[in-house]
Amino acid sequence: MISNFQSADTDETPIDRLLREQAQLQTPVTDFSRRFDEGEFEGPFRELIPLENPKEGEQFAFEVDLDRCTGCKACVAGCHSLNGLEEHETWRDVGLIQGVRDEKAYQQTITTACHHCVDPGCLNGCPVDAYEKDPKTGIVLHLDDQCIGCQYCVLKCPYDVPKYSKRLGIVRKCDMCYNRLSVGEAPACVQSCPTEAIRITTVKKTDKEGAAAIASAPAFLPAAPHQSYTKPTTAYVSTRSVPQDAVAGDATALRPQHAHWPLVIMLALTQISVGLAAAAAIWTTRQPALLVASSVFAMIGLAASVLHLGQPLKAWRAFLGVTHSWLSREIVTFGGYAPLLFGLTAAQFISLPFEIPAFALWATVAVGFAGVFTSVMIYADTQRPFWKFAFSGSRFFGTSLIALGAGGCVFGSCPMSFIALTLGLVLKAMVDITGMIELCNPEFGPGKHSALIQLECEREVFISRWLFTLVGIAMLWFGAQSAFALGGALLILGGEITERYLFFRAVAAPKMPGGIAS
Amino acid sequence: MKTRFAPRPESNTAFRQWNGPLTKEIVQRPSEFGLGQLPQRTQPDATTDSVCGYCGTGCSLKVHLKDSEAINLSANQSYPVNMGMACPKGWEALAPLSAPDRATTPLLRNEAGEMEPISWEKAMETLVSRFKGIKEQHGGEALSWLSTGQIPSEEMAFLGSLCKFGIGMVHGDGNTRQCMATAVTAYKQSFGFDSPPYTYQDFEESDVLVFIGSNACIAHPIMWQRVMRNRRNPDIYVIDPRRTETAMAATHHLQLKPKADLTLLYGLARLLIEKDYIDHDYVAAHTEGFEDFRAFLLNGPYGLAEVSAESGIEESALIELAQKIGSGKRLSFWWTMGVNQSYEGTRVAQAMINICLMTGNIGKPGTGANSITGQCNAMGSRLFSNSTNLLGGHKFTSAEDRAKIAGILKIDESDIPQKDSLAFDQILEGVEEGRIKGLWIIATNTAHSWINQNRWNRLREKLDFLVVQDMYHNTVTAQAADLVLPAAGWGEKEGTFINSERRIGRIRKVRRAPGQALADFHIFQLIAHYWGCGEKFARWTSPEAVFKIFTEVTQGQPCDISGIKDYKMLEENGGIQWPLPAGTETFEKQRRLFADGKYFHPNGRAKFLFDAPQALPESTDEEFPFVLLTGRGSSSQWHTQTRTSKSDVLRKLYPAKAYIEMNPEDAQRLGIKQDDQVVVRSRRGAITIAAHLTPITQVGAIFAPMHYREVNQLTMSSFDPHSREPSYKHCAVQIRKA
């Protein structure tokens, strides 16, 4: 009571008293445990999950009834809260497709989570087998404690499903609320959809494979990445026709991707290292210097790659996926290349009781090129057009060629260096020219998307990349075997690192349709 | 626990780690309280229920507590409103409480013009001395307050009573003027009291649901849930100039020209008369003025062809709708801001009421002319804010009412002003003209939300003292303040809200407010004390004590809640709809008004009210050829975004920057491409904004979500003459590529 403020027994002022009252949480215990104390919880969602477990050749899948999904987005928030995700982490996303149907405007909210693919890209790419396609349910599970945080699955998944957590150093994703389903509860999104638009169904895997086999068939949802790559199992159903030419709300939005600096350094420097090792094998007189340079680059590059991992201490597991993951193969290959290279380099300065045969270095170079090949395949295997084999191969091997040429110029000029330099340069120029031709494409495809990111979002970087390389090569050309050449080589290094930065930034990352961009 | 299949493996092998600290972060375990499986980390040790603090749906949220403090929440399954569902704002209701920009101490503008933290004591002394100074020099009418539909009724009542009975103000209004005033006025005039007649069950029991100016799918998704639960295979009509989410989900979309709604409804009414789809018995027994209305329609330009041409709706569509109504199906109208925020919204709302009255579609299951409320406690504001109405829906101008309230509150009758308050726009006009010198803004962000923003921006100079009381110190309004009072938010205090269907529900204190922030209730207690009028509020010791006052002041009113004993009774019944007079033995969970056909006018009849459609306040012309429509952007955005922008999850669900929707046909003509920046100019301001091209918005019109501040630079100061509600939905603009 206000009038009691001053007549209180204590010296407490009204302000003190109200602050104290404000800090008290007085929710009495008797109020909470009223209703649901006993009994198991199944909720009102029985009909939204299958009564039986999948049989042989079947699996669980999401089914979204587009006619019932009206854009409330509760599924995203419900999943987030009931699964205890990080503040910014969402396993379900919503987007929008828009178009025209029956001469009337058409818009449809799209809710999407993991599609629990029949042939999951994430699982196939994982170097440490941190994914498991559950044999009983077909749910694609992620083993959080197995994950090393390499994020390759993020690149492999065409639907942008796995989400990396910086705090935890791992990737996490939707598991269709496996534990809830295992006791007959509906997944969080199903539980939180006010209009019962999301349900779990049982599907035949062969049906999904069949639907994926025809590349000319329409995508399983307009504006979604085609099913041929990973064979997603989610079905979007509607009793009304869905216009096939509907476009995503963010269809033409430019979305520069994460730069992945450790990978930028790792790729550029390992490729340079291999090029320099090759130079060392060719110009045997300059072998010690070239091998030292090659080793230094390899060391920095491989050290940088470890920085990329969220869980570097678990990296020893990386060989586990060697039968299916190009990343695993890359780690194993460079894991072989590095000790060979370092050993041969050390041998230049230590007198050994035996002579190392010349083919040892050539063999090391071969392992190195195999490593570069695995690097190329890592990106080519994501099916992203900007990273297709011809492009990534030209870029990565081109870097080795340029390094070979530059090494030759710095340490021992010969026509062959110039040939290598020119060849590398031409390869790279061709990639960029082919890429930029896409600008003339009237359709906004991934190629045009990448070109526009480079020209609009990263214009200065793109120009610098070519300035560095061209000026660097000119300096090498005209100042071979001088300090001038060293400066040129450093500029070229800058050019290659910049190119690799653009390689990551400008890739058009596929994903499910997004909302209105801004 | 019965299992269907084995849970995830837990034992690790040499090379596969199925379990460990990272897995434990989220792997689910059975929990108590009917919550099913939850991650170990978020397992509550208790739960409690609290009504959501965003929109007027009034969902109940089950707050998960650990050591008495909220750690998470989910939707309450046993509440008759939301039945276990919530929209994203509800799910994320706790996130805005933890925002780093919460106001944690009073702030006073110093001589250098910077905001400086001060003690509550200094804040109170400053407020009192400044306001008293203004009052002494210019009188009580020179002070005013602008409040909200977002705080509990008990706090609103305290605020209004403190201002009028304690401080001696006359003028105060709420941001409910910006959303519900039209519905309030329409009901008051037609029914004799501000009385939305329906209950949410009507969504499920109606055969023909007509939504006008309502994008319920995203603005009231949990109400749309009830529409989807309708098992009567209903015809769902959406009358809206845009092909909204709701229009997509409906069975029929009548995409009318902007602001053709009144003409369209009159056309429909005339069609019903011409075809004699009239419930003559009902009209005769329970209404007055039908003959005048009939003559007005038959003599006016409301013939089918004229209305069709005016509205852009095909004749056949109107005939079809009329036939459905005429076939005896249960008809219900549902409207929101598309109607309310109009220069003639009151008459549009009444045009719907008229159709319901003449066809007897009111007071029965699945019927009614039903206003969907915007804010969580707009109706609390309507009944108890003591601004437009005297507490409990009484009149300041009635001596009898003043005596009743003075008696209950044990104050002098002379403490109660005898004249009505100015409306929101008139208060700001008073500031503009120098009549109002001191302004106190509580829990609303007027600098963003008020129409014709550049005019508002100039007002600040005219004020001697501006106090802003808010959860956040950096709302655009707070940034203009002389004094900022840090308020506790939803979840940090107690009280009740009244939702769209008149259901009173309880909110709970489940979090500690940051720093020195105090519940608005406590702030009002403090001000009463420092002003020296504390003894007038001797009874106002707690929100529940104030609720007790409500049960007394409403006695004998249409909104009589004297049968509600206490908060506990509210909780035990899943909220209680008004009225509940004392002595009510049993009552249903879903109750509608007017089942007996008795309305609240003295003669017990409802009135037919109508006016010919008025000219647009600002029609398009050669210079400003586009119509600007404004409205809700997405389900994850709320008003001026002071709260929804604080949640990472909600931010993911809406575009970060302002945009307009524009028809591709218009865009092509102006050489505008997808996502281009455009300059939108009205006679009041110009903004640069991204263009999203979509056929959802018809040719000749653009749409801008209201959640981005710049949009109100364009809107125009025009108001419904009956409700004084601003007309946000129509003004003329020009567009060019930036």
Image (cartoon, grey):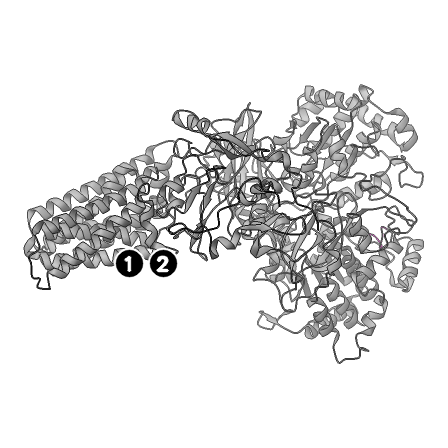
* Neighbour tally class for label 2: few under 14, some 14-19, many 20 plus, Cα within 10 Å: few
Residue B435 showing in the rendered view: no
On residue A439, the disc is none
Hey, what amino acid is under mark 2? Leu
Which chain's residue wears label 1? A
The answer to whether B727 is drawn above or below residue A358 in the figure is: above
Among the 4 quarters of the image, the one containing residue A389: top left
Residue behind mark 1: A303
Residue A313: assigned label? 2
Is B139 above or below relative to A389?
A: below
- Mark 2 and mark 1 residues within 8 Å of each other at the beta carbon: no
Sooner in the amino-acid sequence: mark 2 or mark 1: 1
- Give the chain of mark 2: A
Residue nearest the observer in this picture, A226 or A306? A306
> Mark 1 falls on what kind of element?
helix
Residue B209: x and y in percent read 72, 30
What are the residue bounds of the magenta stretch? B389-393
Closest to the observer, B220 or B91: B91
Q: Is residue A305 rendered to the left or right of residue B657?
A: left
